[in-house]
Amino acid sequence: MAKVEVGEVFTIGDAEGQEQEVEVLATITLEGTDYAAVGFVEDIREETEDDMDIFFLKVDEEGDLEAIENDEEFTKVSYAFEKMMDEEEENS
């Protein structure tokens, strides 16, 4: 399985077909599937962490990012990332 590294930049298309660059902010593996928390590159450069939109995407076998289609899966992933971020803040 291809791994995605924190700091990698990907170009993804949005619903309108516009391409946006996103940077991987964190990765996590749940039940054998890798997920990435990403933010738009331009937001990362301009915004503080509190203002930044963070998206959660699934990493497929080729190491490409794809949308999480299932609400239950999305909830599980967002909760796991939230928990990980809270633990990092406590340890810093």
Image (cartoon, rainbow, N blue to C red):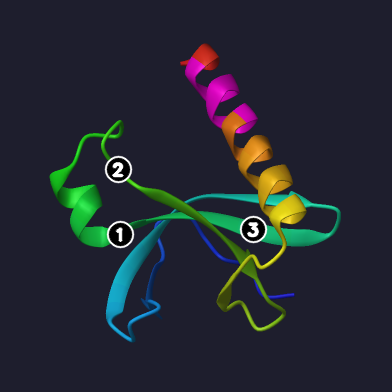
How many numbered marks appear? 3
- Mark toward the start of the polypeptide (2 vs 3): 3
Image position of 57 (left or right of 77): left
Q: Amino acid at mark 1?
A: Phe
Q: Residue at x 30, y 43 (%)?
A: 52
Q: Residue 25 location in percent, x, y?
A: 44, 49
Q: Residue at x 30, y 71 (%)?
A: 21
Mark 3 neighbour density, 10 Å: few (under 14) some (14–19) many (20 or more): many
Q: Which mark is residue 40?
A: 1
State the CA–CA distance, disc 2 to disc 3: 19 Å
State the CA–CA distance, disc 2 to disc 1: 8 Å
Secondary structure under tag 3 reads strand
Q: Which picture quadrant has residue 68? A: bottom right
Q: Residue at x 64, y 69 (%)?
A: 59
Q: Is residue 34 above or below residue 62?
A: above
Which residue is disc 2 drawn over?
A: 52
Secondary structure under tag 1 reads strand
* Residue in the foreground of this view, choosing between 8 and 20: 20
Mark 2 neighbour density, 10 Å: few (under 14) some (14–19) many (20 or more): some
Image position of 75 (left or right of 24): right
Residue furthest top in the image: 90
Q: Is residue 36 above or below residue 83?
A: below
Report the magenta residues as a range. 83-89
State the CA–CA distance, disc 3 to disc 1: 16 Å
- Mark toward the start of the polypeptide (3 vs 1): 3
Q: Amino acid at mark 3?
A: Tyr
Which residue is disc 3 drawn over?
A: 35
Q: Main secondary structure of the magenta part?
A: helix
- Mark toward the start of the polypeptide (2 vs 1): 1
Q: Amino acid at mark 2?
A: Met
